[in-house]
């Protein structure tokens, strides 16, 4: 995500302002890599679908799932509001810059963000959260097949409308077609389905263990076990390499994402295998993933303020790492602020319980 946003235009980095060593010696290749790095959007979508399956797994009704989605939507917009107040309004006030309040609605609702272009994904994630209860109903709901068939039919009609297959014009149609990126909804659904299939496979394993413990193949031992472990690791590395190469060679523009329907599941599958052997890497990336929400919402704001304000004494790699560290620190501060209302409400509840006791 950071590499994608920072190096889409390598031409802004010149020897007059920066030390353009390392990968910036080849600006065309750097830009191409940044274009290919847009698969980060697909990765967010896939993992969101995977995570929401597990969030909804034990829910008992469509209404319960929908309520959870609405709460998450409100929290998402609350996080964006906090970033706008702290990262845009407060900063511009301290620097004596004007704040154009007329631009607040389109930025807060993320349908036409001008303060941070990467906020467009906020609205896309809202569509995913609204789609998630429907996926729960289709894959886990207990209603009859006829009702599910009707839901599928409605989804197909909506898809045809958004895709422009059904010739309907108007303001609403234009807005939806402009602000719904179907490719990321496909990838989101892939992530949800992948989690469901994985869960189903695990349940089959449990049933198989209960029915035919003695009939299962023997567990490999010794050299055979080592060979299998090595081959499995190499298979994971191969999946990652093929996905990266495929994404790079197929990318011809910065906004390209169609190939991610194939590439992103391959990447996730490959990394899930590799992480079994490189636990430290899983913990490291998991740490950044834990703080990724506010890092995503703030990193462009930080980049725009610092890219020409500080000297790249260590070259682009040092600058890149410094940007990541600043975004991480900012994310930690905003997360702490965001927890204050919850802590306040919990303390009030404790006090109220004490009075009742």
Image (cartoon, rainbow, N blue to C red):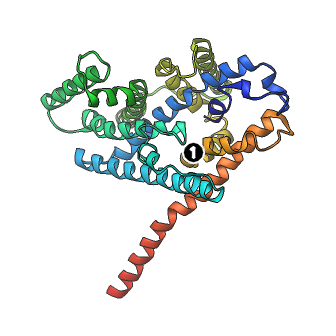
Nearer to the camera, 155 or 116: 116
Quadrant location, the N terminus: top right
Nearer to the camera, 333 or 267: 333
Left or right, 264 with respect to 110, comes to: right
Count residues near mark 1 (Cα–Cα under 10 Å), then give few for <14, some for 14-19, many for 20+: some
Does the rendering let one see residue 161?
yes
Instruction: List x then y, in percent, for residue 151.
Output: 19, 30
Instruction: List x then y, in percent, for residue 136.
Output: 29, 38
Left or right, 134 with respect to 321, comes to: left
Q: Quadrant of residue 91?
A: bottom right
Residue 224 sits above or below residue 328 on the image: above
Secondary structure under the numbered disc 1 in the rendered image: helix
Nearer to the camera, 82 or 195: 82
Does the rendering let one see residue 357?
no
- Please tell me which residue is depicted at 81% across the width and 21% down the height of the picture: 25
- Please tell me which residue is depicted at 52% across the width and 52% down the height of the picture: 84
- Please tell me which residue is depicted at 61% across the width and 22% down the height of the picture: 35
**Tally of numbered tags:** 1
Q: Which residue is mark 1?
A: 292
Instruction: List x then y, in percent, for residue 193.
Output: 38, 30
Residue 101 sits above or below residue 22 on the image: below
Residue 82 sits above or below residue 255 on the image: below
Instruction: List x then y, in percent, for residue 220.
Output: 59, 27
Left or right, 228 with respect to 127, comes to: right
Residue 320 sits above or below residue 226 on the image: below
Left or right, 331 with respect to 135, comes to: right
Quadrant location, the C terminus: bottom left
């Amino acid at each position: 995500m950071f590499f994608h946003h920072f190096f889409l235009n390598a031409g802004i980095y010149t020897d007059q302002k920066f030390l353009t060593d390392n990968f910036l010696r080849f600006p065309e290749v750097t830009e191409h890599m940044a274009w290919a790095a847009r698969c980060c959007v697909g990765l967010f979508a896939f993992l969101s679908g995977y995570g929401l399956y597990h969030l909804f797994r034990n829910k008992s009704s469509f209404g319960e799932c929908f309520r959870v989605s609405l709460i998450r939507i409100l929290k998402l917009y609350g996080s964006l509001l906090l970033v706008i107040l702290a990262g845009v309004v407060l900063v511009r006030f301290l620097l004596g810059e004007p704040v154009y309040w007329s631009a607040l609605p389109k930025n807060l609702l993320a349908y036409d963000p001008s303060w941070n272009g990467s906020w467009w994904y906020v609205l896309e994630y809202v569509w995913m959260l609204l789609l998630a209860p429907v996926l729960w109903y289709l894959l886990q709901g207990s209603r009859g097949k006829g009702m599910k068939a009707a839901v599928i039919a409605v989804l197909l009609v909506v898809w045809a409308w958004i895709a422009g297959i059904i010739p309907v014009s108007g303001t609403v149609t234009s807005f939806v077609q402009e602000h719904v990126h179907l490719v990321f909804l496909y990838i989101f659904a892939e992530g949800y389905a992948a989690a469901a299939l994985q869960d189903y496979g695990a349940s089959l394993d449990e049933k198989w263990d209960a029915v035919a413990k003695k009939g299962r193949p023997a567990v490999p031992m010794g050299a055979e076990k080592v060979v299998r472990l090595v081959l499995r690791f190499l298979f994971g590395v191969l999946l990652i390499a093929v996905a990266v190469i495929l994404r790079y060679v197929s990318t011809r523009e910065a906004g390209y994402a169609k190939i991610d329907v194939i590439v992103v599941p391959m990447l996730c599958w490959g990394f899930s295998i590799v992480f079994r052997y490189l636990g430290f890497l899983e913990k490291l990336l998991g740490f950044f993933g834990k703080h990724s929400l506010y890092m995503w919402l703030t990193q462009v704001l930080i980049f725009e303020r610092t890219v020409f304000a500080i000297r790249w004494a260590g070259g682009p790699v040092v600058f890149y790492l410094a940007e990541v560290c600043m975004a991480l620190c900012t994310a930690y501060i905003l997360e702490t602020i965001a927890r204050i209302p919850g802590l306040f409400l919990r303390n009030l509840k404790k006090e109220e319980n004490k009075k009742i006791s």
